[in-house]
Image (spheres, coloured by chain):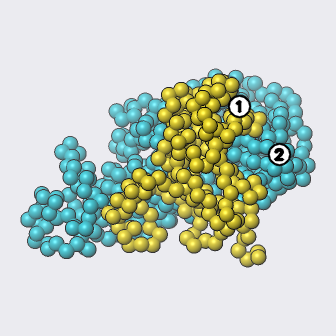
Amino acid sequence: MEKTLLSQHLNRLLKDKVLEIVPFGRSSLMTVWIEAKSLLEVSRILKEDPELCLDWLENLSVAQLDQMFAVSYFLRSYRKQNSLVLRLSAVPQNMKSKIKIDSIASFWPMGRPMELEAEDLFGVHFEKTKAEKLEKSEKQKDDRASRDGGDAIREGEFQPKLLPSGWGGYPLRKNYVFPGRQ
Amino acid sequence: MSETPTTEHSTSDHPEGNRKESRHNTEDYRPKDYQAGADYLAEYNAEFPLMSPKTDLTRWKIGPFHASLPASMILNLVLDGEVISRCSVETGFLHKGLEKALELSPWSSLVPYADHLDPENAVFGELVVCTAVEEIAALEVPLRARVIRLILSELTRISAHLSYTVRLARSVGSDTIVHYVLRDRERILDLFELLTGSRFSLNFLRFGGVKADVTEGFIERVLEICELIKIRLKEYNDIFTYNFSFTRRTYGVAVLPVDMIQKCGITGPNARASGIILDLRKSSPALGYDRIDFQVPIGRGESGALGDIHDRYLVRLREIGQSIEILKQLTEIIPPGDFLEKKLENDIKIPTGEAYSQVESPRGLLGCHIVSDGSGSPNRVQFRTPTISNLLCIPELIPGTRIEDLPVVLASLDLGIAEADR
């Protein structure tokens, strides 16, 4: 979809949920800024809209700019030539606390490993929806790994564990101090 | 190596005699506290009896280092006899903090670091970083440098697919083809050495071009090796591709359906083997392939099951053939001129901005998001690696396959753990 048409279509579709639509760097992509609280609603609309059909989360990237963390979702369509960057910002209470953002894994399952990586490295906790939590708790009843406790992961899952459990701090934050360099 | 087989029934409280009597009644001999595999146990598959449960469920934990694994990872398997019924994957053992290292380095150090994203396909790590930085800084790449980059990319693609053939052949226990393929791959590494001085970590690309012009006789040797590999492809087919013992292990095994590919975001040859035409070389003219005439091979389902291990292997073999065609055309169109726009100093500064670049690496879509705040080093460098998606499909793909097929299935997915863990 052409840039101007895409912009008009998004404004019509998302209405007051869009904060701003700006070009992404020098590229032909558009960045759609939204508020963190409307992420799930916007995700649902973008995925289900027949004209956009953004059914592929190609990439999830987190970047820290001063105190603010920008979470970018690079969305694409398998069937159409549409793509855009959905972006939101979040500020932690202090530089050691976690940030909480809704998980979009129910719309784009391919995003879950990227969310887990960001959680390890940036301390951005992507919260699952109530339905997903319920499903997880039901599965955990049967899961021997979770019954035994410890770090064992749930069956049927892929989980990147980039840091040992109990690692202090979030290495990709700008205020991170390397062990032994205090 | 750590294999810790334990049986679920060892913890159950039913008497042995009771189990014998109710051999065909799955409800009775199932442990009281076990519910997870209830659906699985309830389904008896008359057509494929091996797929139906009939023995005790056993748990195996394989890894992080094991001969059957393509790289360091942990597989938690639940086995029903010789059939895998459930599986989970854990990675992260090769995490080297590459993205943090890139943030702490000056811009000029990005290229040598990017080599280590995926050591086997070093050029693509360099290429994706250079493309992103050039977009932020609006640097023009001379046409000659673009062609040299493409030549290196296609040579790397052939080398990567040959390595894939070696890993797949080893997993099925075919030793002969391994020596044949490694012999030919050496010739490509010789070419890298001739051009860059290195065989693996090339450190050859620069922002705005390449480090040096092609050396004397390089183009002629590229053509010579193209002809050689073309002949060898027929040899591989004779020895390996349609060998009965290989086809028996790969026909119809671990079929990747289209919906699983779309759910996990799988790209590259794995997706194309299942019939999805998705190749950035065709869809993104900015990569420079728009003047080249070539085809994108996709799976044809010759074994009767589209997207099985044999299709994934064949697509890569055909891609080698197409890369040869691309290389031949590139050697014809390589123009005279500069190979570098301007030599950038060591303390270069890239303006404030951001870019997201994508290249078609041998494993799939490789992306790189770079954010610059105008300082001497990048604010953020993030990679989107194709292996993450390939790993994501394993817990869904593996259940139902036999334990002896596990190394073949893992090898067929072309997992690059170095780039997944970064």
Q: Which mark is residue B352?
A: 2
Quarter-wise, where is residue A85 in the image?
top right
A103 or B347: nearer the viewer: A103
Q: Tell me residue B277's x, y (percent).
A: 52, 30
Q: Tell me residue A5's x, y (percent).
A: 65, 24
Q: Residue at (10%, 62%) from the top-left corner?
A: B22
B273 or B329: nearer the viewer: B273
Q: Tell me residue B169's x, y (percent).
A: 47, 48
Q: Residues within 10 Å of mark 1 (few under 14, many from 20)?
A: few
Classify residue B235 as left or right of residue A27: left
Q: Residues within 10 Å of mark 2 (few under 14, many from 20)?
A: some
Residue carrying label 1: A28
Chain A, chosen colour in render: yellow
Q: Is residue B38 above or below residue B293?
A: below
The amino acid beneath tag 1 is: Ser
Classify residue B57 as left or right of residue B377: left
